[in-house]
Image: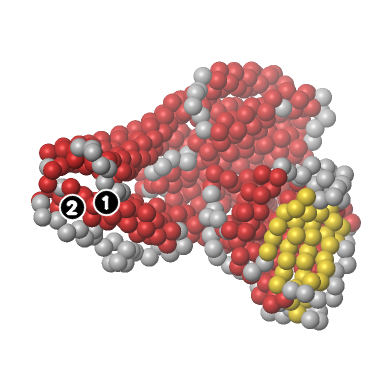
Amino acid sequence: MPPTRGRPIGLKLLVLLLVPLLSLVGLWAFAASLTGGQGMRLLSMNDLATNLADPSEQVNIQLQNERLASVELLVTTRGANKLAGQRERTDRAVTKLRTLSGNLRDLSPELIAQLNGLHVKLDELAELRRDVDDARAEPLDVIERYSQIVDASFRMYDTMVLVPDMALYQQARAVTMLGEAKDVLSRERALIAIVLAKGRVEDAERESFTGMVATRRLLFSQAMSHLDDSLRGPYAQMAASPVYMEFLEAEELVRGQAAANGLPVGAATWPIDGQNLWAAVERNQALAVRGITERVMPTAIGMLVKLGVAGGVGLVVVVASILLSLRFRRRLVRELAGLRDAATELAEVRLAALVKRLRSNTAPPTAAEVAPLEVKVETSEVHDIVRAFNDVQSTAVEAAVSQARLRHGVSQVFVNLARRNQSLLHRQLLQLDSMERATEEPGELADLFKLDHLTTRMRRHAESLIILSDQAPGRAWRNPVPILDVLRAAVAEVEEYDRVEVLTPPPVALVGSAVTDVAHLMAELVENATLFSPPMTKVDVRTGRTPHGLVVEVEDRGLGLPRVELDELNDRLTDTPEFDLAQSDRLGLFVVSRLAARHGIKVALVPSPYGGLTATVALPSALLAEQPVAAGR
């Protein structure tokens, strides 16, 4: 900054120190607001628990009881008075939930959306009751429709437990999973009532019950693995109790009982076994929820205490820097130029380069990246300022490294979960394939094909998490695959695949190393085309050769996008930005951008003559084989 003629030296010093001082204040304010916001969010959890979590939990309990009473009325035509009383209790719980939740303010958009979704599901309760009263609904359908209402509350719980403290989050998430396992137990009790009324276990009941048992046991085991000793204790005792063992035995009997064999002699005790376990689970769940709630306040207070200490120290440093600068300003004029230059290099070059490097590489900073400021000074005051800047640099570097490691840790969590889901879905696809080969009944085969298609889409979503974490999916191909097969595989992973028309491409093949990624990329673009175009329109997939490779076009007949938004999306596809959790609605474009950058593929969105959009995918010649060959894994 050049000197200003005719102005006091004190003003010059003030101008020279303004930028670093404001930077220091801004850094302190940012850290204080960030930590304070997290602490205040934890403090608000008690209010959420009182006015939202507890009332919704009571609604779930009443819905679970009403589900059982409704099924018993349908299968036995008895218990109408019992059901009427239960409905009154459910209505009171729902009214209380609506009243208390309506008083909440400053909720996050995600939580508001989930709460509104729960209210919508609760509005469907009246129609469900009419179907039960008129005996128009099948018992299994009644179980499923009640379950959908309860599931909406658990999706809301998932949003509520997103607290900034990781240890507390893990415990809260585990308690939520136990609540889901408890609801599955309620479904099992309702299905047992159906079985006892019929006097046998038919195929539909056995299949549904088998899925419930597997889900409940999986949720219970996963939750137990995350709970600490204090919360796990009551559940561990319950799992080793005779009550739990008797219900496990009942589960195995129901799963293994054929329709022709009738029920065993001890089947009459199944409802009692379920009631005994239900009472123990309700008691343990209440203890676990209360234990989690009691931990919120100490964690929030501890976080705010740390904020007060750190904020006070930071404020003292800022004030001291200003006072020292004013006191010794006449002796610091010649030295401030060097200090200014060093601070500018730190803020605009070194720290910026370090932050940019940490986005892709979380290795500890090198000595050169965290080298202290070197300014030739003669007074101790300026030396103290230099040291203060070095402390700021260390704090900023530690914060950047910590954030980078946190992002990396979250990414690894996504990868681990996605890998597990990918493995399970692969096994499920193999099982479905075996079931498809073993059946010849058209109806069952059609259902299996639908389930196979749904599992394939779920596998793609799991692979999207892996791709967003800069990892490679597990699927791979050794040999080139015809481009037609690649496009068909991509279309097969889209929900509305029947709307997509793949025009015959040139006789070329895609190298095996790129098959999985290109198919995933095309599936994301095709799915976007089907989602953002009218349901009755077609989506065309055309392919053509170019001097530099192959171009694939995906054209829809939607409403299109404004030019500004279209340019923004094309920039994102070209520059491969860092994934932003706040823009999860554009998840597919992030995946496409990552895959395109991995293989040197160019993707662009342009207006379509039909009013929608056309996504052009330019595959370089390095990814192509001249002649199509048989594919192999």
Quarter-of-image position of residue 349: bottom left
The residue wearing badge 2 is: 335
Q: Nearer the viewer, residue 30 or 493?
A: 30
Snapshot quadrant of residue 425: bottom right
Helix, strand or loop under label 1: helix
Residue 411, relative to residue 227: is it above or below? below
Q: Nearer the viewer, residue 307 or 333?
A: 333
Q: Is residue 108 left or right of residue 574?
A: left
Q: Position of residue 234 (x, y in %)?
A: 41, 42
Q: Nearer the viewer, residue 521 or 474?
A: 521
Vertical relation: 295 (above or below) 227: above
Find out whether the residues at labels 1 and 2 contact each other: C-beta distance under 8 Å. no
Asked which quadrant contains residue 485, the reply is bottom right
Disc on the earlier residue, 1 or 2: 2
* Residue 138 visible, this orientation: yes
Rendered residue at 15%/42% (across/down):
329
Q: Quadrant of the C terminus?
A: bottom right
Q: Sort mark 2 into few (<14), some (14-19) or many (20+) by Cα contacts within 10 Å.
A: some
Q: Which mark is residue 340?
A: 1
User: Mark 1: few, some, or many residues within 10 Å (few <14, many ≥20)?
Assistant: some
The residue shown at (68%, 40%) is: 192
Percent of width and height locating residue 47 = 43, 26
Identify the residue shown where x is 69% and y is 77%: 622
In this rendering, is residue 46 above or below 520?
A: above
Along the line of sight, the residue nearer the viewer: 301 or 56: 301
Q: Position of residue 126 (x, y in %)?
A: 73, 23
Say above or below: 341 vs 136.
below
Residue at the limit of the structure toward the front, as seen here: 6
In the rendered view, does 102 fall on the left or right side of 328? right
